[in-house]
Image (cartoon, grey):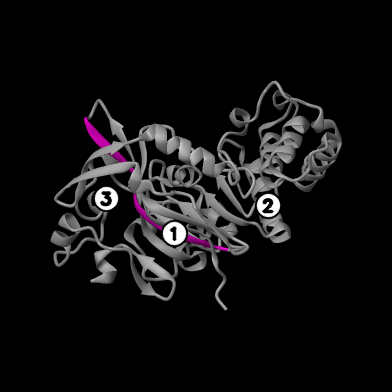
Amino acid sequence: MAVEPVLTIEDLRTYFYSRSKRAFIRSVDGVGLQVRRGETLGIVGESGSGKSVTALSVIGLIDAEPGVITGRVGFRVNGTEWSLLPSIGDHVSLAEEDGRIVEVVKDNRGWRRKVDRLMHGVRGREISMIFQNPRVSLNPFVTIGSQVAESVLLNTGIRNRREAAEKARYWLEQVRMDSPGLRFAQYPGDLSGGMCQRAMIAMALSSEPSLLIADEPTTGLDSTIQSKIVELLDDLKKAVGVTTVLISHDINVVARLSDSVAVMYGGTVLEYGPADRVLSPDFLPKHPYVEALLESIPSERHIKDGLLPRAIEGEVLDTVNAPRGCRFFDRCHRITNGIEEKCRDLEPDLAEISAGHQMRCWLHIG
């Protein structure tokens, strides 16, 4: 029997208006994904591909206008389902020209009130997030123990402060905090970056959430600490079994921790499927962008064959000027004469090329 999805995203679009360019930044442009219970979905891609904005849109943390304009986000736990984008159409009207959105009118104040009411019982309790920079996310004037205990009080059934403090110590031990009793009484400024990240992970897991979103959890840490955090996340995945969305530009981290992978570029998903297919250089077919990403990362294969990693030519797509055709068109080295016109003028659908494996490329979907 198929495991039910905890999170289902359909046609998610999050746009921001650039006053200087008098145009929309199409940060997320038609993304659809699923995460099944107990699994880890990895989202990879270069900076600016829309990974973090996708996650922030799902949990209602987009402040800039207009923000989310279309889509459906379904969240299902123990037979109960929430719509995390309720009645988005009641708050947004769109004007289109030649199939493209050219004008957005949105009641942002009304939408924000609605989302905040909905997320009050979901965000932090059923869905937790580990943010990119733990030093920024932690309050520098409150001890680590108090911050984790406060999360316990806010997001669990525990109301006694002594019990909450005991639970906080338990989670600091679970994330292998060095000398957890000592760190409990210290401030974020007294801790290393790796320790702050462990404190953030403890805080995120303290509510025993149904879904954990980890946004670049190893960014800004040195390589030794990165390795230890990845090992910790791997062990916690096996021990706790929490459903996870892992966002990273580090393909090696995603390959180690993920069951399935979505590769994003220019605000959309170019390839989506099992991690051992999408991120294996030996598994074909492969989207040209994914192939280029894998070729740009030093690996055992490079050492064995005496090859140097190859940089991806060109610049990351400016989604203000997203092309009508393939988002990767200007950087692709595999375009043939037979498909060049289609690649330039017509964006391919995300189509299934084998069971559970989807790709957005005219080379493979004809």
Q: Examine the rendered structure and indicate whether residue 195 appears above or below residue 283.
A: above
Q: Residue furthest bottom?
A: 1
Q: Which residue is mark 2?
A: 231
Tag 2: amino acid: Glu
Q: Is residue 147 left or right of residue 32?
A: right
Q: Secondary structure at mark 1?
A: strand
Sequence order check: which comes first, mark 3 or mark 2?
Answer: 2
**Measuring 81% from the left and 28% from the top, which residue is drawn there?**
185
32 part of magenta stretch: yes
Foreground of the two, 162 or 135: 162
Task: Report the predominant secondary structure element of the magenta stretch.
Answer: strand
Sequence order check: which comes first, mark 3 or mark 1?
Answer: 1
Tag 1: amino acid: Leu
- In what quadrant of the picture does the C terminus appear? bottom left
Cα distance between the residues tagged 3 and 2: 35 Å
Q: Quadrant of residue 164?
A: top right
Can you give x and y, in whole percent of width and height, for residue 161 in the image?
Answer: 82, 34
Crowd class of label 3 (few under 14; some 14 to 19; many from 20; radius 10 Å): some
Cα distance between the residues tagged 3 and 1: 25 Å
Q: Is residue 3 left or right of residue 151?
A: left
Q: Which residue is mark 1?
A: 33
Q: Secondary structure at mark 3?
A: helix
Q: Which residue is mark 3?
A: 331
Crowd class of label 1 (few under 14; some 14 to 19; many from 20; radius 10 Å): some
Sequence order check: which comes first, mark 1 or mark 2?
Answer: 1
Tag 3: amino acid: Arg
The magenta stretch is 22-36
